[in-house]
Image (cartoon, helix red, strand yellow):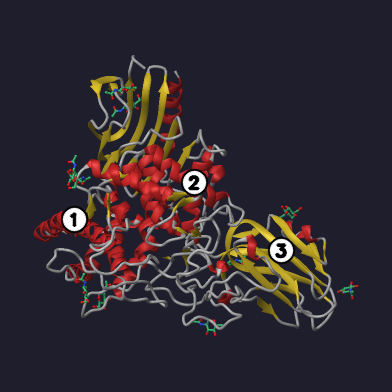
Amino acid sequence: MLSLILSILTIAVLATQLSSQLAPSGPWDAFNYAPKTRIVYATSIRHAESTSESENLLNGDNGSATLNGNGAWVTLDFGKEVGGLISMNFDSINSSSSSISLAFTESPMFISPTLSDDSSFPIATMNYDGVLSVPAPLDVGFWTQPAFSLRGGFRFLTIASTGDEFPITISNVSCNISFMPHVEDMTAYTGYFYAKDTEFEDEDFLTKLWYAGAYTVQTNTVAVNTGRQVPFEPQGHWANNATLGVAGPIIVDGAKRDRAVWPGDMGIAVPTQFVSTFDLIPTRNALSTMFANINPQTGALPESGPPLSQLGSDTYHCWTLIGSYNYYLYSGDDEWLNTIWANYTLAVSFIEGKVDDSGLLNVTGLRDWARQGGGGHNSEGNAILYKVLTTASALASYANQSSLSRAYAANASSLKTTFNTAFWMPDVGMYRDNTSTTLTPQDANSFAVLFNVTLNDTQKEMVSQGLEKNWVEFGAVPPELPDTISPFISGFELQAHFVAGNDSRAFDLLHREWGYILYTNLSVQSTLVEGLTANGSLYYRYYQGYNDDAAYTSHSHGWSSGPTSALTFYVAGLTITAPQGREWSLAPHVGGPMNRSQAGFSTALGWFGVEWERGVGESVLSLNVSSPESTSGVFTVPRGVNGTLRVNGTEVSKDAREGDTIEFQGGYWQILITNENV
Ligand SMILES: *[C@@H]1O[C@H](CO)[C@@H](O)[C@H](O)[C@H]1NC(C)=O
Ligand SMILES: *[C@@H]1O[C@H](CO)[C@@H](O)[C@H](O)[C@H]1NC(C)=O
Ligand SMILES: *[C@@H]1O[C@H](CO)[C@@H](O)[C@H](O)[C@H]1NC(C)=O
Ligand SMILES: *[C@@H]1O[C@H](CO)[C@@H](O)[C@H](O)[C@H]1NC(C)=O
Ligand SMILES: *[C@@H]1O[C@H](CO)[C@@H](O)[C@H](O)[C@H]1NC(C)=O
Ligand SMILES: *[C@@H]1O[C@H](CO)[C@@H](O)[C@H](O)[C@H]1NC(C)=O
Ligand SMILES: *[C@@H]1O[C@H](CO)[C@@H](O)[C@H](O)[C@H]1NC(C)=O
Ligand SMILES: *[C@@H]1O[C@H](CO)[C@@H](O)[C@H](O)[C@H]1NC(C)=O
Ligand SMILES: *[C@@H]1O[C@H](CO)[C@@H](O)[C@H](O)[C@H]1NC(C)=O
Ligand SMILES: *[C@@H]1O[C@H](CO)[C@@H](O)[C@H](O)[C@H]1NC(C)=O
Ligand SMILES: *[C@@H]1O[C@H](CO)[C@@H](O)[C@H](O)[C@H]1NC(C)=O
Ligand SMILES: *[C@@H]1O[C@H](CO)[C@@H](O)[C@H](O)[C@H]1NC(C)=O
């Protein structure tokens, strides 16, 4: 009965899809963090010192507050991560020597009238950036922060009086959101996800997390002339007016910093973007920027985009190539593929050229996601190369280069064999980091399962089990970067547990790691932090590049948004397997802490949606799936499910078992699996 009601609701929802590319509206919209308007105001006063009527600053331009002389300050809380230029009105200025300063921070740990959190450079004294000084004389009237001093990510703004003893009366303190500059309505998502978590203390955790990941990537989507300046500004300053690439808008790693293109980060951020906003132009611009900066002699791609323009990373070289496949899969952009094809194939040749007589890639471009010990015959680099070769084979086939496609596939196949011989430790049930260690890295083991470098399902299960040994209260601690929690690499691990078929282990990791990240009051409770120490502190990478500076950590990093695409692709279970979704797969993981789940997304072909519900009466599982007419898909019976399978009321199998598959043409289908023995 319940499932019948569900179906009637679904038809209403699907009807609205025919005319629109947007996601249907529903209770999930309440969790969309994106601001409805570009001008936003603070939602609460965090602290006020010698300031009168500070609450008036929450009323837009309807009332003023007075900073009562030097030493007065007020901290505004925008309620979530924002980024953009601050404006305000100076209503009365009693002295020509009145002046103010603005200090910004993401984490409330670094609220101060004299310091911002750090973005220009990390130092142990945590006082690099300083404040934006607005010098005397202040003119009565409307004031806007100069463009170069943009803060791309903050939640708290502190305004301090820094001149003399005279009062300064201000009003209308607003932030003009600078991210997603090309989009009118930032809440207009093309995808959605909804489920109630029956295990976590907040039943809306999964839905909130899905939207937090989506919003994180939106805050990382920026105008091309708003990059962090390199060389870095001197201490006491910051500047975000550098040019980031060949065109904008463009996707960068973080809202506050680095504000530069990083292709590894895109390995997580771009699938997030696909399932939520389908805003792929910033990705195309980022990838085009990498190809435009290829070394024409060697074929090496840079590790990061300008002005940072780091060189010398074999893994990030590979991520640009994998990212090209993702962009093409989602967009089907033939024109772009043909434009970059010569440079793409040159770049594949460059990395294949590092495969030596052993049959393995010798990693000599050592820069990476901060992990240690990555050089030589390293399993992480080789797992990533395997993904490069399988995706290059697919892309060559789409580019109508069939013999090249076969050659890439053959190279992938032999790399897979060599990889397993070199790195698999049968007694441990995991892969080792290189041929002279027993260290079992989080990254390579997660990649091996996710990219299918494993030879059989038993290996997948063993690796999934082995990865759990790295867990502490707040998540997974990578052996290759001790005393760290990396939501970037954990995003791949999360997917690996689903691929290995262990849904409860995947949800355990999700609850531990992102359950902490989304709710801890050390962070912004709306976007996702780049990393933590093993005990959950903000001193991420304190010993590895970040110089003991907890204030440097970014609280809005797209690479931490792995759960967003994982919830859509694995939990709701809908994913695309050919460009634009011409072919798709429906393979839900129903072993998690929810009785039903629903999600959908759009491509240029139209709307893809699924709703499933578990265990109502004799029904073991009922699913409704919708896809554009021109497509075809494959449904896989989920783990733990069996019984009589009907499609649109017609019995298709009396004894469907987990792993059985059924092919579908595009359209709307109701799938019902019943089992009278339940
Ligand atoms: C300011 O006052 C106007 C008129 O009363 C009202 O429409 C508007 O919503 C107020 N703005 C804010 C931000 O409270
Ligand atoms: C500041 O100037 C305003 C008018 O601009 C005046 O009403 C107010 O009394 C002055 N306050 C002080 C402390 O001088
Ligand atoms: C960026 O801003 C700084 C500080 O105002 C200025 O010196 C510099 O010329 C600006 N650079 C660009 C590229 O606009
Ligand atoms: C308040 O600030 C907004 C946004 O910057 C601006 O559009 C508006 O004109 C200001 N209102 C007044 C009364 O100055
Ligand atoms: C907000 O910033 C954008 C981009 O710089 C600008 O075009 C727009 O005029 C600003 N809005 C207001 C109200 O100042
Ligand atoms: C390809 O690489 C060359 C350098 O060899 C560069 O000049 C060109 O812009 C690149 N083309 C594309 C489409 O990125
Ligand atoms: C990888 O190449 C470097 C540079 O040629 C060389 O020094 C190193 O010995 C090689 N590593 C392995 C494992 O062959
Ligand atoms: C490959 O060939 C097909 C059929 O001619 C064509 O539609 C498609 O655009 C070609 N692929 C690319 C990347 O140009
Ligand atoms: C993964 O690898 C196995 C064994 O090499 C192969 O049988 C299977 O088809 C592969 N799976 C996918 C999804 O490519
Ligand atoms: C899976 O592959 C591993 C590595 O080659 C091998 O040791 C193991 O025996 C295989 N297991 C099964 C069940 O085929
Ligand atoms: C079939 O599913 C029922 C529960 O729905 C379960 O108890 C039973 O073990 C399953 N049988 C098989 C062979 O998977
Ligand atoms: C399956 O049934 C639904 C509901 O009755 C109907 O809307 C849909 O068109 C049917 N699908 C096909 C492909 O016939």
> With respect to residue 282, does 567 lie above or below?
above
For the residues marked 2 and 1, what is the alpha-carbon distance in whole angstroms?
40 Å
Return the disc, 1 or 3, that comes first in the chain's sequence: 3
Left or right? Give the position of 612 relative to 529.
left
User: The residue under label 3 is which amino acid type?
Assistant: Thr
Q: Earlier in the sequence, mark 2 or mark 3?
A: 3
* Badge nearest the viewer, 2 or 3: 2
Query: Residue 419: x percent and y percent?
Result: 19, 57
Please give the residue where the numbered disc 1 appears in the rendered image: 398
Camera-side mark, 1 or 3 = 3
Instruction: Name the residue furthest top.
Output: 676
The image position of residue 355, as x and y in percent, is 17, 67
Q: Are marks 1 and 3 in contact (CB under 8 Å)?
A: no
Residue 468 place in picture, x, y as percent: 39, 46
From what the image shows, is residue 272 above or below residue 624?
below
Q: Position of residue 580 (x, y in %)?
A: 29, 49
For residue 75, the mark is: 3
Which element type, helix, strand or loop, lies under badge 2? helix
Q: Is residue 106 left or right of residue 58?
A: left
Q: Would you call the spot at circle 3 few (<14 residues within 10 Å), some (14-19), or many (20 or more)?
A: many
Image mark for residue 512? 2
**Separation of marks 2 and 3 at Cα, in angstroms:** 31 Å
Position above or below: 128 against 267:
below
Question: Mark 1 vs ligand 8: CB under 8 Å?
Answer: yes
Q: Is mark 2 within 8 Å of ligand 9?
A: no
